[in-house]
């Protein structure tokens, strides 16, 4: 269980590393999406057909599943909203003018250096050219959520609360979190199972 990866973003795993890089650039440089002139993303060869080809289709996702397998869309919501959660993967999001602006400027490339490290790692890089002439770059060896780059407990709680809110009350969510935090002290696992029931 300690070697299990957690997906912090609502999409295909091949997109996670590049999204992490773009989120890093967004945080570090406070990028305004409308100031983006071009985005280049390094994708491992095994993921190109899933998330990057054909590029025009990937720049024009029609369904939520299309969005989940579109690297241009993932790049665009990361640079626009500063995250790529379930809230960003919504039917009307590709029509957002800022998201559309960035999607149209994303290109995906393979890189032998990335492929040489796969599948032991899932490395990625991303570059953003800004309209004022800067080229900003970020690289990552392991996507957020891999055992080598784990999500924090606070990030896990945030994801749980977001995903369970349609079916679990805030009070019950906090009870479940408290039970998980004290799992080693629970005498009967049925106590936790009862909390997880929505009936």
Image: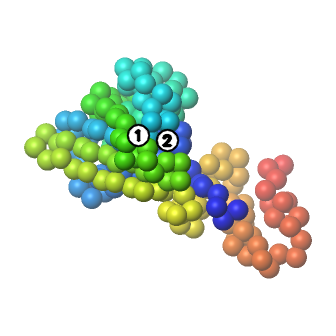
Provide the residue designation for mark 2: 14
Q: Nearer the viewer, residue 152 or 3?
A: 3
- Name the residue: 32% across, 46% down: 126
Where does the image place residue 123, in percent across and percent down from the top left? 43, 51
Q: Quadrant of residue 3?
A: bottom right
Lateral position of residue 126 relative to residue 87, left or right: left
Q: How is the structure coloured here? A: rainbow
- Residue 195 image offset from top left, x and y in percent: 80, 60
Residue depicted at x 29% and y 27%: 104
**Depicted 2 relative to depicted 72: above or below:** below
Disc 2 packing (10 Å; few <14; some 14–19; many ≥20) = many
Please identify the quadrant where the N terminus is shown: bottom right
Element assignment for label 2: helix
The answer to whether residue 114 is left or right of residue 188 is left
Q: Is residue 104 above or below residue 37?
A: above
Query: Do we see residue 19 in this rendering?
Result: no
Q: Quadrant of residue 157?
A: bottom right
Dot 1, crowdedness within 10 Å: few (<14), some or many (≥20)? Answer: many
Q: CA distance from mark 1 to mark 2?
A: 7 Å
Q: Nearer the viewer, residue 74 or 146?
A: 146
Contact (Cβ within 8 Å) of mark 1 with mark 2? yes
Whether 110 is drawn above or below 6: the answer is: above
The secondary structure type at the circle numbered 1 is loop
Residue occupied by mark 1: 43
Give the mark, 1 or 2, whose residue is nearer the N terminus. 2
Which residue is pictured at 43% across the width and 44% down the height? 115
């Amino acid at each position: 269980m300690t070697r299990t990866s957690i997906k912090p973003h609502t999409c295909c795993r091949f997109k996670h590393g590049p999204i992490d890089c773009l989120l890093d650039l967004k945080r570090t440089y406070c990028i305004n999406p409308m100031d983006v002139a071009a985005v280049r993303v390094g994708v491992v060869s095994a993921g190109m057909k899933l998330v990057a080809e054909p590029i025009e289709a990937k720049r024009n996702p029609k369904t939520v599943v299309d969005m989940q397998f579109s690297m241009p869309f993932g790049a665009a919501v990361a640079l626009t909203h500063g995250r790529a959660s379930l809230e960003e993967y919504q039917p009307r999001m590709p029509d957002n003018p800022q998201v559309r602006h960035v999607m149209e400027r994303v290109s995906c490339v393979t890189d032998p250096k990335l492929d040489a490290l796969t599948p032991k790692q899932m490395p990625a890089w991303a570059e953003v050219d800004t309209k004022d002439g800067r080229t900003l770059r970020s690289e990552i060896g392991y996507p957020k959520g891999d055992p080598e780059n784990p999500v924090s407990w606070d990030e896990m709680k945030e994801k749980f609360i977001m995903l369970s809110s349609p079916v679990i009350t805030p009070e019950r969510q906090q009870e479940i979190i408290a039970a998980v935090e004290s799992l080693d002290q629970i005498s009967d696992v049925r106590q936790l199972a009862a909390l997880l029931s929505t009936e």
